[in-house]
Image (cartoon, grey):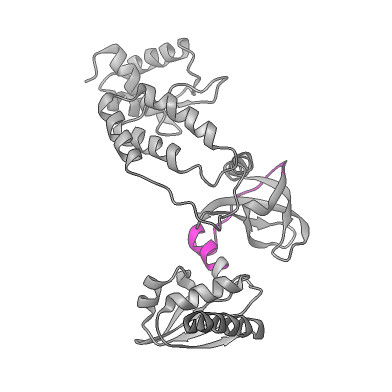
Amino acid sequence: MTTDLPARMLRLLSLLQTRREWSGTELAERLGVTTRTIRRDIDRLRDLGYPVDGTTGHTGGYRLASGTAMPPLILDDDEATAVAVALRTAAGNLTGMEETALRALAKLEQVLPRRLRAQVTALQQATATIEWARRVPRVDPTLLTALAAACRDHETVTFDYLTSSGAQASRRVEPHHLVASGGLWYLLAHDTDKDDWRVYRIDRIAHPAPTRRHFAPRSVPNGDPAAYVAEKIATAPARHRAIATVHAPADTIRRRTWALAGRIQPIDANTCTVDCSSNSLPGIAQTLAALDTDYTLDADQEVTAYLRKTTERTTRALDR
């Protein structure tokens, strides 16, 4: 039973932050007090400025609502460590987030217990980030926030979209999920004009606008948003076609390449096909080199011409 009032209030606040809504009975059981005590403690939180909404009646409940300012969060040890590390390392692909993330990190580290501060500091000091020459497009966090809110509120949005061919197009969609993959962000949405599911690169989206029209959420075709987006990425049309028949088991090739699993299909126990098609000729060459075994290639003329030129360049370098 939680008898110490300050400790019980902190525990109550922590519970309210972990779920959208709690019944008074559930909170009373968790804290080992009566529902009457819960009602008094809720009133105390409200007096302190926490916006706790409640409904009356037999099925009444409580939830922490949004207010004019964000109330202090209560995190356990693992949550605090995860947030601190994420603030340090996860903002690299979001435009303009470095300074904001570091300010938030400074506030968090200031109140971390000494034991946790030492753990976070050790992890950060032992972690380094490699900057690759070819960087993925960065995403505006304001854009991510707007799309995430539309997904949460089931609100139709419109936006301008830059297609893979470089054309500008207007879209009107019902947004369902945000999916991150390989440093890129994707929006999974149902296109109202085409009446079909579509996957959009978020770095190609501009000027999103809410319509204040809400929709009933749909079920993703295969029930798994990430798997569906991965399948669509793997089967998306590419500028350059290249299909390799590889003399190695599919599982072996999956371990050797960065190719999506859906692009590697087994033929038998010792042979598979790898769809290396891409908008980048160097990218195709890199995937083929990573196969590290014999293969035959069915590819467009520009792909074979590029590979011959690369082979000739390598041969001249070796001859020298």
Locate residue 199, reporting x and y percent. Answer: 62, 60
The part of the image, by quadrant, that contains residue 195 is bottom right
Q: Does the magenta portion include 66?
A: no
Please tell me which residue lies in front, 299 or 150: 299
Q: Residue at x 56, y 51 (%)?
A: 177
Locate residue 205, reporting x and y percent. Answer: 68, 51
The part of the image, by quadrant, that contains residue 134 is bottom right
- Mark yes or no: residue 58 visible: no
Furthest residue to the front? 320
Q: Residue at x 49, y 28 (%)?
A: 103
Q: Residue at x 34, y 29 (%)?
A: 26
Looking at the image, residue 198 lies above or below residue 314: above
The part of the image, by quadrant, that contains residue 43 is top left
- Mark yes or no: residue 128 visible: yes
Locate residue 259, reporting x and y percent. Answer: 47, 70
Looking at the image, residue 46 lies above or below residue 162: above
For the N terminus, the quadrant is: top left
Please tell me which residue lies in front, 202 or 276: 276
Range of residues picked out in magenta: 208-232
Looking at the image, residue 21 lies above or below residue 11: below
Q: Residue at x 55, y 37 (%)?
A: 97
